[in-house]
Image (cartoon, rainbow, N blue to C red):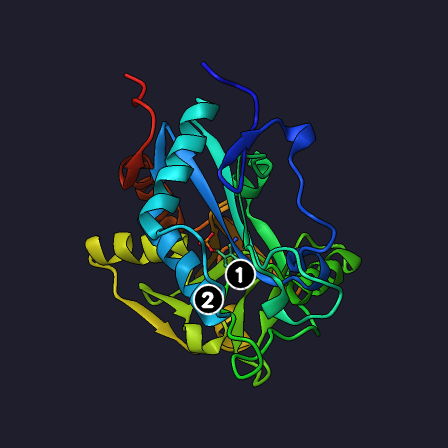
Amino acid sequence: MQTAMQIYVNGCFVPAQEASVSVFDHGFLYGDGVFEGIRVYDGNIFRLQQHVERLYHSAQCILLRIPLTPEEMRLAIVETVRRRGLPSQYVRAVVSRGAGDLGLDPRRCKHPSVIIIADTISLYPEQFYTEGLELVTVATRRTPSWALDPRIKSLNYLNNILAKLEAQQAGVEEAVLLNAEGYVAECTADNIFVVRQGRLLTPSTAAGALLGVTRDGVLDLAREQGIPCEETFLTRYDLYTAEECFMTGTGAEIVPVIRIDRRQIGTGTPGAMTQQLRQAFAKLCRNDGVRALPAAV
Ligand code: PMP
């Protein structure tokens, strides 16, 4: 079993200490590029197809031509995961504009950089899941879609980082970002859901949410279980009066939220629907995707 971190840089696998990109890469100079964070569960690359599709849509929106076909990208990711060999992994795929000069003209960047890193996941503390997480709404607003569509998963995360810093300054782990109109958009690297009268509600992408792969998975599971779902517009009123609230993301999976802006949400403990969806999700992520390594028996 291979255990060293595996890094693919422009078609070659290189040791971590030799893996590098140019200081003239516009991904570094300007955040000009796109990326994906992908989980491997028990050798299964969870929803690889959807991640690759989102990567190519993000790239298309910023006129970045990825020098691999989507199929080649999928195969490169599978190969990186195979070489890593571990049943549980976290994979980062990055495509940046590539090396240019110090001006921001993308035409000067002749060769986009393609990087795939197969690492291990550093899991959130168990306490987040058993006791629930506290959020705070912050003054930093989600970049409006008329300025930079939040569906583009770009290398430019300053908006999210500013929100994260604000939450931390307030002594809270995670932030809720509102959009310019005051509607709830998402958390700094996770989508948000609420439960109201047995219905599952989550901000629409038009409100500034990323089209999360985990979000999609949760909506699929809820619909399968006959839970009515709505992608809609939510305000802080909807958060404060929710029966349950949770966050979803590749790294976080499904995290119960029990307090927002120092107010208790629902019973102040992880809710029943949240728990039910967490259990269903644990099964889904081992089966839905592309198998890179044999499943444990
Ligand atoms: N919103 C943002 C801003 C993100 O960066 C992410 C990814 N970490 C998510 C939501 C969740 O998306 P996914 O479920 O695809 O990881």
Please report the residue visible at 48 percent of the width from the left and 61 percent of the height from the top: 192
Which element is circle 2 on? Answer: loop
Report whether 112 appears left or right of 281: right
As drawn, 258 above or below 202: above
Asked whether the beta carbons under mark 2 and mark 1 sit within 8 Å of each other, the answer is yes
- When the figure is inspected, residue 114 is found, relative to residue 152, above or below; the finding is above
Is residue 121 at all visible to an observer of this figure? yes
Location of residue 271 with respect to 39 vertically, above or below:
below
Q: Going from the N terminus, do you reach mark 2 or mark 1 first? A: 2
- 14 or 185, which lies in front? 14
Alpha carbons under labels 2 and 1: distance apart? 6 Å
Q: Amino acid at mark 2?
A: Ala
User: Residue 153: x percent and y percent?
Assistant: 51, 61
For label 1, the SS is loop
Residue 1 x/y as whole percent: 45, 14
Kindly tell me whether residue 263 is visible in this rendering. Answer: no
Tell me where residue 259 appears, x and y as whole percent: 59, 58
The residue under the point 70% across, 74% down is 139
Give the residue type at disc 1. Ile
Q: Residue 178 versus residue 258: which sits nearer the camera?
A: 178
- Residue 17 drawn above or below residue 189: above
Tell me which corner region of the image, top left, top right, bottom left or bottom right, holds residue 5: top right
- What residue would you read off at disc 1? 265
Q: Residue at x 66, y 67 (%)?
A: 159
Q: Which residue is mark 2?
A: 242
Q: Which one is nearer the viewer's eye here, 26 or 129? A: 26
Look at the image and tell me in which quarter the C terminus lies: top left
Lateral position of residue 231 relative to residue 203, left or right? left
